[in-house]
Amino acid sequence: MSTKNCPTCGVSVPENAAFCPNCGANLTSFQPQTPPTYQSQAPPQPPTPPQPPQRPTGVVVLAVLEVIGGLYSILAGAAAGTILGAIAPFLAAFGALFIVIGIINLVLAWGLYNGKSWARIVAMVFAVISLISIPIGTIIGIIILYYLTRPHVKAFFGAT
């Protein structure tokens, strides 16, 4: 006669037994259990570095306006330097001054677009200077100063 082991207590019982004579376990309803499978856990991932704040749209607009202003200043400076230099050579310095201002505007645009903290400060200084250009310069300067002091813009430039 063949035997099997009781799944509950492990005692050897006859193959056709319905109950275990030792513990009374029901052998007909027993479903063999498969041993639990353990999935290997992936090693913990290193923490991701904090992402820099997303570039605000207004900063992009300011950078584009600085590029336009810079190119305009460079072209105006070259034209003024040529025309005024033909009239009186010492007036060509005005053209050179416009070219330098245009270059500063282009560098400022690059700094604003890339979130450099110094660019925010320089843009604020330029906005303060523009306040004396009543009424349009004053309005634009106030808007720029207000915008550059917003928390999300300050965070983009790394200011607190």
Image (cartoon, rainbow, N blue to C red):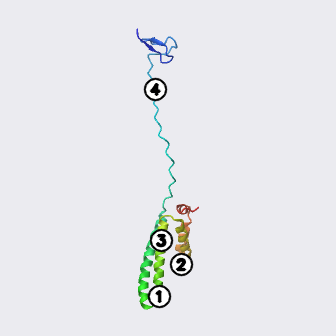
- Callout in the foreground (1, 2): 1
Q: Report how far apart the C-alphas of labels 1 and 4 lie in the structure.
A: 94 Å
Label number found at residue 91: 1
Residue under pointer 4:
35
Circles 1 and 3 in contact, beta carbons < 8 Å: no
Task: Name which of mark 2 and mark 3 comes first in the sequence.
Answer: 3
Q: Report how far apart the C-alphas of labels 2 and 3 lie in the structure.
A: 27 Å
Q: Secondary structure at mark 1?
A: helix
How packed mark 4 is, by other alpha carbons closer than 10 Å (few <14, some 14-19, many 20 or more), is few
Q: In this rendering, is residue 65 above or below 84?
A: above
Circles 2 and 3 in contact, beta carbons < 8 Å: no
Residue furthest toward the bottom? 87
Looking at the picture, which amino acid does disc 2 mark?
Pro
Label number found at residue 107: 3
Circles 4 and 2 in contact, beta carbons < 8 Å: no
Image position, residue 11 (x, y; %):
49, 13
Image position, residue 8 (x, y; %):
50, 18
Question: Which is more toward the observer, 33 or 47?
Answer: 47
Task: Name which of mark 1 and mark 3 comes first in the sequence.
Answer: 1
At 45% from the left edge and 83% from the top edge, which residue is drawn? 95
